[in-house]
Image (tube, grey):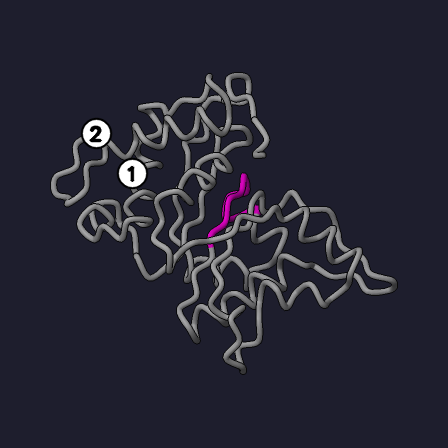
Amino acid sequence: MKITTSLFNYKQILQLLAEKGREQFGKHFQLYNEDLPVLIPIIAWMLRDEEVAHEFNIDLHKGIFLGGPVGVGKTHIMRLMQLIVPTPLRYELQSCDKVSTAFTRKGPVILDKYIGDPEKKGSYNHHVWCFDDLGMEDPAHYYRITCEVMKKILLGRYELFIRYGTFTHVTSSLDPDAIERKYGKEVRSRMREMVNRVTFDKNTKDKRGTLKHISRP
């Protein structure tokens, strides 16, 4: 893949990410040439590289939605991107299932961590999150309260996006139609406004047989 203009050396950046990937996820980790159409635009977003972002139709004012089949390495990629994103845009990665489980244990209070309060100037209003494996979370129940936690969070994040330009990133194996079936038309519409959709080809091979995760110390 040829990048026509850029101030950054993408070859060196990819080599660095591959090395860090082997350190974090095991010696068999590698970045595949066929995945460059996914990797390059995400790197461009992280580096705020306007020229390359424009080549890939990436809006730097929106977050990233990284989609694709199960097992293609979406979570690994977003973990690696934390190494190159500038400090003001640093994000935490949180499993959607863990968010749902936390609601079941602690109740609605956990929502403040993710959606803040658009009417107040709290730090949570500007915190960048990456919600991992959207659609894989279990239903959340707290006493007699049943909550579509990720639906509520995504709609809340949209309010922060509109008011403050707060970024939200998402990984998911769901396509837009599946997102609409699970969360409704409103969520699909809001996500279209606040994230760039970057996806692996549906025929991308499952890489889990070659990636051995090594827990961080």
- Is residue 175 magenta-colored? yes
Residue 4 at x, y percent in the picture: 12, 39
Identify the residue shown where x is 53% and y is 48%.
93
Q: Which residues are magenta?
A: 169-178
Q: Residue furthest front?
A: 217
Residue 42 at x, y percent in the picture: 34, 44
Q: Earlier in the sequence, mark 1 or mark 2?
A: 2
Q: Is residue 189 above or below residue 34?
A: below
Q: Amino acid at mark 1?
A: Ile
Q: Is residue 182 above or below residue 14?
A: below
Rounded to the nearest whole Å, what is the CA distance between mark 1 and mark 2? 9 Å
Horizontally, residue 56 falls left or right of residue 204, namely left
Q: Quadrant of the C terminus?
A: top right
Residue 212 at x, y percent in the picture: 55, 21
Identify the residue shown where x is 55% and y is 17%.
209
Q: Quadrant of the N terminus?
A: top left
Residue 1: mark? 2
User: In which image quadrant can residue 39 be found?
Assistant: top left
Could you tell me if the residues under marks 1 and 2 are in contact, i.e. CB atoms within 8 Å? yes
Horizontally, residue 145 falls left or right of residue 99, namely right
Q: Is residue 152 above or below residue 25?
A: below
Q: How many numbered marks have been drawn onto this rendered protein structure?
A: 2
Nearer-the-camera pick, 134 or 185: 134
Q: Amino acid at mark 2?
A: Met
User: In which image quadrant can residue 110 be found?
Assistant: bottom right
Residue 40: mark? 1
Nearer-the-camera pick, 55 or 117: 117
Q: Residue furthest right?
A: 143
Horizontally, residue 120 falls left or right of residue 62, namely right
* Crowding near the residue tagged with mark 1, few <14, some 14–19, many ≥20 C-alpha atoms within 10 Å: some
Q: Secondary structure at mark 2?
A: loop
